[in-house]
Amino acid sequence: MTADHTTEAPTYPFGPVNKLDLHPRYAELRRTEPITRVRMPYGGEAWLITGYTELKQFLADRRFSSLRATEPDTARVTPLPLRKGNLLSMDPPEHTRIRRVVAGAFTKRRIDALAPRIKEVVHEQLDAMAKHGAPVDAVEYLAVPVPVTMICELFGISYEDRDRFRQFSDIFVATSGAPPEEIERSRNELEAYLGELAEQRRREPREDLVTTLLEAFEQKDRLSETEMLRTGIGILMAGHETSLSMIANVLYLLLAQPELWAQLRDDPRLVHSTIEEMLRVIPLRSVGSFPRVAIEDVEIAGVTIRAGETVVFQRASADRDERIFDNPEEIDLTRSHNPHLGFGHGAHHCLGASIARLELQLVLEGLIERFPQLRLAVPADEVPWKPGLIARCPSALPVEW
């Protein structure tokens, strides 16, 4: 089947983003048209993938270019396209070259070595919650400080310096939540900040990710200055903004359905399967993915995507595909067969998957131990959410025990 451009494509997104709900149109498309044309908020039309098999094939296919999607006329959900020089906007072999530089910071050995420190940070925050007394905001006291502390330490940044990058992070990941000029300014400010850190490490090298990136830049053939700065920004943003959003979302979902929290509390052995189920079912991205562009004609599931056409996807829809998952709309903390795509697939599989899982594990284990009667302090419908951002996240999560 080839593209039919004679009928007008539906407008995407399909409706307003509501908490962690997925618009019902995704389920309909998965069953009837898992690759379909949509009109994007910026840049015209694109293909939208909603099915699991189709998405997994797409993610592994190098004929779809992330670099081509940095052009200003690319169909997309964000006001500005990704900048070149970021891991997310690269294709192999450049992507492979830069990923190899930073991968050493995320090996299993390095992440396992971080476990005692993450656990220490988690329990420091749980102490602070207990000292404050109920009700307390779990976003402020737990979801933010745990991943932000760890990304600060990975980069060799003082935790007290966190506001230097935190003030730009929500703007950096805005869809409708900020005008293009503010997004551009946040990008420039973050590049300047990373440049300052690199200058500091040039004078005083440390065992941190900034020094690793700087050393690769100074070898010339491994990283350009732009690649050094934008790779650093990409990891900095993903390492705290995505993780804090996921921690907050997991806690919200477990506490909004108290029977889920009770099940986990009564059987802490379910922590690992709970994390995988949360990664499957939570639609972290408010709307479709960062785009990719076909560099030649590609056929997926009988649909021909022409060279130059743009493709986006909704990962959370694919992870509810009835062809792959039993009772996919049900949250099953004991689910054993769970090949979700929560961290992606193929060349762009998330580098930080191990540390993200570990942070979630230690947060949940700490809460079960310290606050087994944890519950929302307000009705679930009254939990406030951040508007207009790429990642869904409560702006506050009042809890008591």
Image (tube, rainbow, N blue to C red):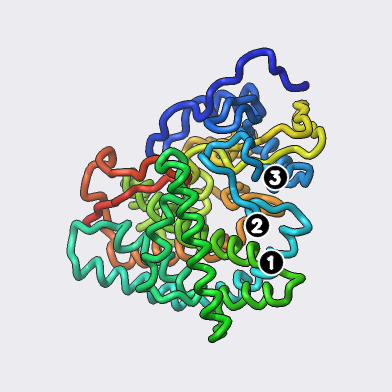
Q: Nearer the viewer, mark 2 or mark 3?
A: 2
Between the residue at mark 2 and the residue at mark 1, the CA separation in whole angstroms equals 9 Å
Q: Which residue is mark 3?
A: 59
The N terminus sits in image quarter: top right
Q: Which mark identifies residue 132? A: none
Look at the numbered disc 2 and give the secondary structure of its residue: loop
Q: Is there CB contact under 8 Å for labels 3 and 1?
A: no
Image quadrant where residue 28 sits: top right
Where does residue 219 sit, x and y in percent of width and height? 73, 76
Q: Is there CB contact under 8 Å for labels 2 and 1?
A: yes
Q: Which mark identifies residue 224? A: 1
Q: Is residue 388 above or below residue 351?
A: above
Q: From this viewpoint, is residue 35 visible?
A: yes
Which residue does the image show at 28% across and 63% down from the upper left?
371
Where does residue 239 sit, x and y in percent of width and height? 50, 62
Image quadrant where residue 294 sits: top right
Which residue does the image show at 73% across and 22% down from the upper left?
3
Q: Which residue is mark 2?
A: 85
Between the residue at mark 2 and the residue at mark 3, the CA separation in whole angstroms equals 20 Å
Look at the numbered disc 3 and give the secondary structure of its residue: helix
Q: Is there CB contact under 8 Å for labels 2 and 3?
A: no
* Nearest the eye: 358 or 195: 195
Where does residue 310 sit, x and y in percent of width and height? 68, 34
Kind of residue sitting beneath label 2: Gly
